Amino acid sequence: MLTTIAALKERGDVTAINDLIPYAQSVGLEAMTDASGLLVVLRFRESNIGNSAMRFIHGGVVGALMEHAAILHLLAETEAAVVPKIINLSIDYLRPSLAADTFARGAVLKQGRRVANVRMFAWQDSPDRPVAAGHAHFLLT
Amino acid sequence: MIIPNRPPDLRRIIRAFEDLPHARDVGMTFLSLDHGRGSMRMPYDSRLVGNPETRVVHGGVITALLDTLCGAVVMASVPEGTPLATLDLRIDYLHPASPGETIRASAECYKVTANVAFVRGLAYHEAIDDPIAHCAGTFMLGTGFSADAAPVAGGGGAPSSDGGPSC
């Protein structure tokens, strides 16, 4: 690896970190920045379908999107020198995710000395109609 | 587990879940499925790596496996054809998965009410008493969605039969 994650984090280059992660490429997770800040996108792929009859995206992949958004937001927003380690994750599924791109953002609710608490939510057509919401704890030491 | 007049068709559930595009994509298969409990396995694959420095799989891989298994176990605990949707899923990561090793999961549906099924599960490599992750999930029953394939909003669940986790 030419550049380590720590070095990329130092530069605040979350998109470059995302591009180094094989799983992100496998399921179609992308990181970008818009007017509201970091935006994580799960591109629609047939291989992410979890209900063939209804053509819904697999809830586990939506969960992966939420976790990924939480980690990338933490890397972007905190000063921690190490890559945060996830302690736990809770996801509420609000609506089925249809066969289309899904978007997610995270927000660091509290950063303590050892633990960070992050909130996440995901949507498709409009942030006003979230498909999932969640929260996660990360160890920063 | 009380199963009214239409018992779940375990073979159909296994087939339906293993045939899901995402289950095929990551290689999830059943080790066992029974009424109320089940287990699955997923081989290590470098495509699933979440940390390129340690080669540990992405946490989302474990989420997807547990979500799938939990959904299948719930489906194996309710009358055949009952539609279901993941309401929520909580996962505690107990220690990192080991690169190169197959991940297994076992889950049990420990309570079914008129509207909600409650399920818990563990992910591990070889020994269930040294788990990688613990999960607790709830599923809505009778969601109005078609039950042809797998559960809805959440992942699917797979039934298991290997004695299951006791968590």
Image: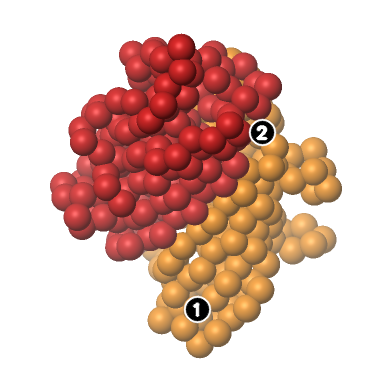
Chain colours: A orange, B red
Task: Where is residue B142? Give x, y as percent.
Answer: 62, 25
Q: Quadrant of the N terminus of chain B?
A: top left
Disc 2 residue crowd, few under 14, some 14–19, many 20+, Cα 10 Å: many
Task: Where is residue A11? Give x, y as percent.
Answer: 57, 74
- Residue at label 2? A96
Labels 1 and 2: the sequence-earlier one: 2
Can you tell which quarter of the image residue B69 is in?
Answer: top left
Residue drawn at 41 percent across, 15 percent down: B7
Q: Amino acid at mark 2?
A: Pro
Residue drawn at 44 percent across, 55 percent down: B91
Disc 1 residue crowd, few under 14, some 14–19, many 20+, Cα 10 Å: some
User: Quick check: A107 left or right of B86?
Assistant: right
Q: Chain of mark 2?
A: A
Task: Where is residue B86? Give x, y as percent.
Answer: 56, 38
> Which residue occupies the foreground of this view, B33 or A122?
B33
SS for tag 1?
A: strand
Q: Amino acid at mark 1?
A: Val
> Which residue occupies the foreground of this view, A122 or A18?
A122
Q: Which mark is residue A115?
A: 1
Q: Which mark is residue B13?
A: none
